[in-house]
Each structure stands twice: as structure tokens, then as C-alpha cells.
Amino acid sequence: MNTLDSLRAEFLAALAAAADREALAAVHQGWLGRKGRLQDLFKQMRELPAEERPAFGAQINVLKEELEAVFMARQEELLNREGVARVDLTLPGHPVRTGSLHPLQQILDRITGIFTRMGFTVEDGPEVETERYNFDMLNTPFWHPARMESDSLYLQQGHMLRTETSPVQIRVLEQVKPPVRIIAPGRVYRNDKPDASHSPMFMQVEGLYVDHGVTFADLKGTLLEFYRRMFGPDTRLRFRPHFFPFTEPSAEVDVSCIFCGGAGCRVCKHSGWLEMGGSGLVDPAVLTGVDLDPEEWTGFAFGLGVERMAMLLYGVDDIRLFYENDWRFLEQF
Amino acid sequence: MFFGLFLNFVTVRKNPDGGVTMKISLSWLNDFLPVDTSPAGVAALTHELTMLGFEVESVQRIGRELIGVVAAFVEKVEPHPNADRLRLVTVNHGAGRLTLVCGAPNVAEGLTVPLAQLGAVLPGVEQPLKKARIRGVDSEGMLCSEVELGLSDDHSGLKLLDPADWKPGDPLARDYNLQDVVLDLEITQNRGDAYSILGIARDLAALRGVPLSRPEAPAAPAADGDERVEIVLDPACADCSRYAGQRMSGVRVGPSPRWLVNRLEAVGLRSISNVVDVTNYVMWELGHPLHAFDLREVRGRRIHVRNAAAGERFTTLDGQERTLDVEHTLICDGERPVALAGIMGGLNSGIAADTTEILLECAVFDSVGIRMGARRAGLSSDSSRRFERGVDPRDVEAVLRRASSLVALTAGGQLAGGCADADPRPWQPQPLTLRSARCNAVLGLALSAERMRAHLEALGCECETSAEGLRVTPPSWRHDLEREIDLIEEVVRLEGYEQVPQPDSARVPLGQRGNPRRELLERVRREAVGLGFRQVMSYSMTDPRQLERVLPERPVLQIRNPLSQEMSVLRPSLLPSLLETAVYNLNRRAEGQRLFELDREFHPDPACATGCRESLHLALLLVGQLRPESWQGPAEAYGFHDLKEVVLLLLSHLHLEGLRLLPYLDGVFSANSLAIERDGERLGVFGQLEPRLCERMGTEWPVFALDLDLESVARLAPGLPRYQPFSRQPSVLRDLSLISPAELPAGALADTLLEAGRPLLQQVQVVDVYQGKGVPDGCVSRSYRLRFNDRERSLSDADVDPVVTDLLKQAEQRHGARLRS
């Protein structure tokens, strides 16, 4: 008994004397550790007669718990007194270089994300195209002004830079039997001098759905769904008759102005509408060109401009900013 | 009408859809159907036109109101007592006489001139006219030139009024007031029939379901006898299917009446003379171009239409001599060409001031022929633009009647005989079938055949009910109605696109192919961003001179019609533009740049159908300061090992296995570069770019870059990582400082250690590199931290010590490396 009491007393004295972490750790090791003095008591226990051992063991355990608790309290007290090493909170943080996606990439990802969730798959095609795919197969007659050198860029070696991503649709229709439900995003090229609203290169997303019984109503419904997911559930669409060689009936698609909701503002030039791109039912001549019977298959196609959408959504007023890659521009996205 | 065109030459806006813009005046449109010009009315009209497919690009109100300006008769002109250049003029203005001061050089007794009375409001002047005292004499009004009346910028003298037409006191407002609204419409390429006031009115009437009224065209008086010109169409000339000519005699060429000038000016045309103005007016109104010849110059009173000979020269009335080819069509008289058919008249036969006999031409030329001819001649005119889109082959008589009627009205003259009309291949109607079920199936509507018929008939089609639906004969002016789908489009256009319902569900076909390549690109972009890189996008077109500076003598694809030399070739690598971007930003106070671009390279390749192999690459670049100067220390520049870490992380995140890094050097990448290879195929290169090349591009910073061929990466089809069971046993660490010859790469020694220490040695890290005191010259001391581990058990010194002994022996034997004591 006395052994236990004196042990307690010694422990408490040593603990009181321990003034820092190291001393504290030494106390813990000396009394409570694997080779500590309490462990020695358990060894002594073996020398006792068998009938005394349980009672003694219980006493040691009680003592051990008690000492552990006192130790914890003391440790807490010491650590509290020590506190945290203070730093100057007003100094600036460590610089971290973060990466970012180009703003056009971010918009493009959003567009393709929506269409993908709407059951469109993404297809690619070459940017250097043959006139056959870029024009002939899209029902564009040989005299069409879009074919002129003042409108399109041609290569010295022959062929041309695609003026839209529609050739991808033809290439897919040549390879895959309908139903086909695709979008084709990518760079397209026009013979336009760069200025605030023109760029000789820009990005387009074109869509195509060919199946049994696709109607003009399906076109309207699909685009409405897309633009609502893009611009919000209150978005309204206006389809205006227009002409494109590869669709008929053709429509220009206007979206209710995303800034004024259609009431009229500076951005929509007080019309309430923003022009987004062309659309229409695939012209029977285009289907016939890829050996599809227009009596059996119908389809719709549409296009939209990535830069245009990015300019609207980010409030960018000069298309050249996207390709200038000034860090002061890029870091904002 | 090609006369006068060159004066109205407006640059036609480039429109890739082949559309064209046309101004229409609403007062003019009002001749055909009622038009409400109130703001609400114009807004409603704008909506109607928009939904018919004619985009309204601008709405402009034009106005000129002359208040208090009347005709006055000059009775007396006297000198001004105090000024040599001024006169005192007494005029009779119908209600009495006034005296005023006038400085106009042409003032003279007996003239009829415009008088602005006191209180008159003149265009552009806010205050009403007040009594003025000029050099001591009161002036009770002002005699006006065209400038003061806002009619033109002619200020050479008083405007003279025709005394036969103007009595003193007649308000000038009678003829010179102008209140109009002008719309700028886009006419799509397929709608040649709508390229006129009539065409627009026709569509509006169909939409509204109201009748169309046409302006009256009373027949011009006829002279005695019949002196038609002889018209011969060369059978070899395919581009002219009809040619009609109307002779008129007794014509007096002079200025046009004001109403005519007003209308032409409203739509952007300039008045030339009454006869020429009439041809322009009728073209604008009815959409069929006309031309007026001075009959004196039509030799032999004969018109011969033929193909031009190759190299034939002809001077058009803009004074330019043009060299023609066989695809041009010429209008010739008995001896020589007098007009370039459908495009522009000849300088030799235009209307002159003393012309009295004219030939009005109204012809039908092939649209493609005129389009190609105009393009070859580099000449686009109001006339050619209309022929290109197709004119009505059946309106020739009506057009000539309207034109001769207006010539008679504005310039006098009589019809000299009937209309000579060569029409060897008369227009034939082409009936079509419209299946009403098909129409509804395509549109997603449920219209009755009757409803479809009503729309088509409103547009001028003749319809008969047939078994399947309708048998439809389009009118002669609608060249675009050739197929059933064209009729379906007309039905929905008149029904209204907004009437087509929007379904609330869509079918998604299953079993479509995926796009694993695109998914890889997304992954690569995500990794690059995660590693702290900013994506840039540059033009695919680049400057060959710039390219030469970075990648000399690379084969490139050249653009035949480049915008500029700066954009005249397709880039064969992403590196030059990425480097250019980095330099651009360094020059704009960007301290450090971590940039990447992921896009296509273009390589000439005859094996490809397009002559071009497009391959996707990732280019990634580090330059400048890794860390800017801050309170934590001085600035630190990027080095090779910053890039190396990034590249290895990227490759490991793509789960590419079996990669080897081999020394590389190619003139762009310096000797501080490594190639990434797998099974002998090079996937990419990374390292420091040649410093002289970077200096040429404008930076003295070392530049570190990666060029990774994603086509090769995609072929390896990197997939998901394979889980590797890891050891839960504690590791034993040992640090060894080894002295070795300096030329021995740290990696070689590490490889030796790793090999010798297998299987317990798991990892070798270089933790210190030291040269100096205690290390012999030509040697280097490197500290390697070795990590030993076993999956099954906890290792003891007894396990590790013999391994260390062994690997030290290997290091010494192979590399002469020994422990630093």
C-alpha cells in the first residue's frame, strides 16, 4: 500500500517539476510508459500469493487511471500556457500560380456539356477540307458567293479551310447509318479582316439529328431546351424564316435578350432579341447526297457561334481579345 | 437601267449567305397596299417583314417640311444703295408685294423663285425667319437656293421654278415636302422575286390576306407608224432567253419631277435625268432592270445579242474599258456592242442631254450567266444583282408599259410603234405535287389541305386538288419553288414559324459511337490546369517569317488568298505562337508564365485526302519567375526541373506506362532536353528551348517547353490506373553521401543503387548535391535517401545493413563512387 502511495507522491512531484514538453514526455515514459514504474508494479504482482493478486492488480489499474488523468490535465495546462507561435497576419500570402481554361473553352465545354446531356455525341473532322465536303455536299452551288476567294480561304496546294463545321455532319452521315444525333464543335475560317466583331477564325458548334420522323417542331423543341439550359428557364426563342443552301425550311434563331429579358436594351439594340445562329430541316438534296432517302429519313441541323455566346455571357466587346491571349484578360476567367 | 449605276455605287456588304440589302420607302410601298407609318404601324410592319423572312436591318424616318415658303415672281431688281453685290428685289407672292435684299448672282426680273416669308421654317433651322436689316435696308423675306430648302447642296444661285407650273403664292410644300420611312431589308439569296417594292408588297399582301393594288400605268401616246427595232438573239448565246425593246420618240431629256427624285433619294439612288431615273424607278419598283439607249447610237436600228469574244474590249458607261471573255453576253447594234448584258450599259450609247429618241430595253438574262459575268468583270450593279437572283420572265410587257408611261409623263414622248419582243423559249409552268400528309409530317403541324392551298394561292400559285393533296403551279416570278419541300417552306412561312408547337420530349437514339479521343483531350486540359497552367488559343494561321525564326525550313501549307502575310501559312507546330504569346505577356509585366495550348498542327501530306495531316498536340511552356520577389525572399526563375516535375506528373496522371526519357537535341530544343519514348515511338519532347532562338523572339529568359503528340498518346489509349497493393509495414530510411566523378549523372548512380538494393530498396531520392570543401576537384558529393520496405514484415537493421554494404560495393565498382567520410 505504501508503495502505491509513495509512487503517487513521487509522480505528482515529478509532474509538477516538468516545465516543458520534453520533461513532460520524460515523466510519461518514466512512470506510464512501456518500461515505466507502473509497469514494474505489474511485474511485482507476480511475486505475490495468487489470492492477493486480483486485488493488487485492481489497485494498480485504479492508480494508473488516476495518474493518466492527472498527466493529461497537466499536459493540457502546459500546452495552454505555451500557446501557438504567432505570425504576422498582415503579411501577404504565398503566391500560388493557378491554371485556368481559356474563356472560349469554358463556354464550349458548357455548350457541349448541355448537348451531351441531351443525347448528342461529339464528332470531329478536319479543318482543312475539300470543296466537295465544304460546299458540294452541302448543296452549295458552284456560283455561290461563299465560295469566292473574298469569302473563303483556300490553300496554295488546293483544298480550303472549312467555313463551317457542317462538313463533319456529311462525313459522319457517310460512315454511320441514322439515327445520328451529333454536334460538331470546332474552328472555322472566313476571309474576314479582324476587327472588333470579325475574326478570320472562330469557333462554331453545329448540330445534326437525322432519324425517322424528325420534324420542324423537334428542331424548335430541342433548341428551346438547349437555350433554356444555357441562359435560364425563362428564355424564349424566335424562329425567323431565312435561307441556307443546306436546310429547308430554314430559320434564324433569336433568343430573348439575356440582359433585358426582351424589354429592349442597348445590347439587343432595343429589339428584345439576340441573333444566335441558323437552323433548319436538312435539305433533301443533302440527304440524297449521302445515299439517304429523304422519304424515309428527315433531320434538323443548327449552328451557333462560341465567341458570340462568350461575348454575350462575359460582356466582352472585342472578339480579338480571345486570340490575343493577354494575361490580364485570361486571368479574369 | 444600268445607266447611272456607277454613281450609286454602294459597296455591297459581304454576306456569306448570299443575301443583299435593299432600301424600301413606305410611301412607295403604300402604292401597293395600305401602310401605316405611325411608330406603332412601322413596328408592326417590321415584325411582319421579319417573320416573312426579310430581316429589317434599320428603320429610318426621313422628313423635310417647308413652312411658309411660296413661289414668287420677281418684278423688279434694283441695286442696293450700300453694297455692290446685293440687290433690292421686289417680288409678287400672290397675296401682295414685298421688297427684300438678295445676294444671289442669278436673280433677274421675270423669274419665278422660292420665297421664304417672314415666319417661314426652313429645314435645319430652328428659329422662324425674322425681318432682317441688311446694310441699312429692311428685308422682308428671303429668296432661296436649293441649300436653304434642304433639297441639295447646290448654293450657286436661286432655285428656279417653272413659271408654267408655279403661280405666285403656290406653297413649295406642294412638291417638296417629304415625309417617309425607309427600311433597310435583307433579301435572302433565294428570293430574287422579293428584290423590289412589288415583291415585298406581294408577300405582305399574302400574309395579310389583302389584295394588291398596282400603280396605274396609262398607255403612253402612240406616234404614227410602226418603227420597231429588229431584234436578233444569237442561237449560240444561251444566257438571253428573252429580249424586248420599246422605241419612243419625241423625248425631252431634263430634270425629273420632285416626287420622282424624292423616291429615288429615299432609297439611296441619285437622280440623273428623267429618262434614266424612270428606268431606275421601275427597276426598284418592279424588280426588273431596264436600260435606255439613245436610239441615235443604236446603229442600223438593230439589236443583236451574242456572246462576247475572248479578249474583246468594251467600255462600260462608268468609263472603264473592260476585257471580256466568251462567258459574257453583249448587246450589240448593227455594228458594235452597246451594252454588257444585264450588268452595265456602254459609254457609247447612253442617254445624253439632247437625246430625243430612245430604246427601252427589258430582257431576261440567265441568273448564273450574269453572276459569273459580273464576277469576272469585277462589276456588281443594281441590275446584275437582280438578274443574278432571277427576274420574272413574264412581266416584260408590264415593265415596259410602266416605264414608257412614266417616260411620257416626265419627259414627254410617244411610243414609236409596238414593242419588239424576241421570246424564243417562252417560260413554261412547272407544276409540283404537295402531299398534305408529308407537309404536316415534316413540319409537325396538322394543317388542312385547304389551309395549305390558301397560303400558296395567296403567293400567286395556282392550285388544284389532287389525290395526294395539291397540284401546285408556282408563279413565273418564283424561281425558288422547284420541289415539294420548297412549297412546304412557303406553307410554314405564311402559317408562321411561331405556330409550330414545341414538343416537350425528344427521342435519344441508343448505340451511338462515343468519342474517346475527345475525352482524352478533356483529361489533358484538366491536368494542365491542375498543374497551374493557363490555356491560350492562337490563330491557326501564322506568319512564315516568324515561323522561320523558330522552326526554319519546316514544310507548311500556304493560304492562296491570305488576309495578310502575318496570317498566310498554317502553323506546323504550336510552339512558335505559344512562345510569341509568352513574350507578348512578358513585355506586359507578366512576371512568370505557365501557358499551354492544345490544338492542331497542320502538316502537308499528299497521302491525306485533304492534302493535310492534322495532328493534335499539347504545347506547354514555362518562362520567367517561378516566384516573384516577396517578403519571403528574392525572385526565383523557372528551371529545367520545374518543367520536369510537371511533365512527369502529367504523364503519370495519364497513366501511360513503359515510358523512357532519352537525351534529345534538335535545334529548337537545346541539349537540356529529353524525348519521351515508348517502344521506340517518340511521344514528345521537353526541355529548354535554344536560347538564341528565344532571344530572336524577344526574351532573354530561359524558356522551358513540352511538345506532346496527343495523336500518339491517344493511340496508346491511356485508361484507368491499376491499383497496386501498398505496404502497411514501416519503412527504414538510410541517408548515404556518395562522392563520385562530377560527370556521372545523379540518375545513373541512383539507378545502380536501386537495382543493387532490390527487392527491399523501394525508393532512392537525391536530397543534397554538394561540391567544395572536403570533396576532391572534379567530383561531386550527393546525398541519397534510401527507403527500404517489405510488405510482410517490419525491417530491422540486420535486414538492411547487408543490403547497404552490397549496394555500396556496386556503386564503387561501377562508378567509382565512395562514401564521404
Image: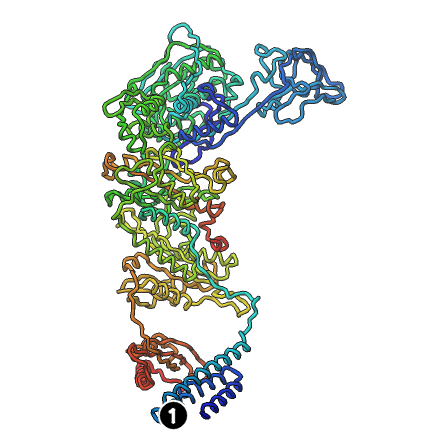
Depth check, front residue: B194 or A14:
A14
**Is A330 positioned to the left or the right of B372 in the image?**
right
B554 lies above or below B797? above
Q: Residue at x 47, y 42 (%)?
A: A258
What number of labels is visible?
1
The residue under the point 44% across, 56% down is: B580
Q: Is residue A147 visible in this depiction of the protein?
A: no
Residue B213: horizontal and vertical position, in percent?
Answer: 42, 17
Give the left or right position of residue B786, taking residue B249 as reference: left
Q: Amino acid at mark 1?
A: Gln
Quadrant housing residue B450? top left
The answer to whether residue A126 is seen in the rendering is yes
Q: Position of residue B117 (x, y in %)?
A: 67, 18
- Farthest residue, direction front: A51
Q: Residue B649: percent from the left, percent from the top? A: 37, 65
Specify the quadrant that holds the C terminus of chain B.
bottom left
Looking at the picture, tell me which residue is in the foreground, B608 or B49.
B49
- Residue B590 vs B93, above or below: the answer is below
At x 55% / y 65%, what residue is drawn?
A92
Helix, strand or loop under label 1 = helix
Residue A136 found in image quarter: top left
Q: Nearer the viewer, residue B472 or A202?
A: B472
Residue bearing mark 1: A44
Residue B248 x/y as whole percent: 43, 12
Pointer 1 indicates a residue of which chain? A
In the rendered image, the quadrant that contains the N terminus of chain B is top left
Residue found at the very far top of the displayed protein: B224
Within 10 Å of disc 1 (Cα), the crowding (few <14, some 14-19, many 20+) is: few
Of residue B182 and residue B771, the one placed in the foreground of this image is: B182
Coloring applied to the structure: rainbow
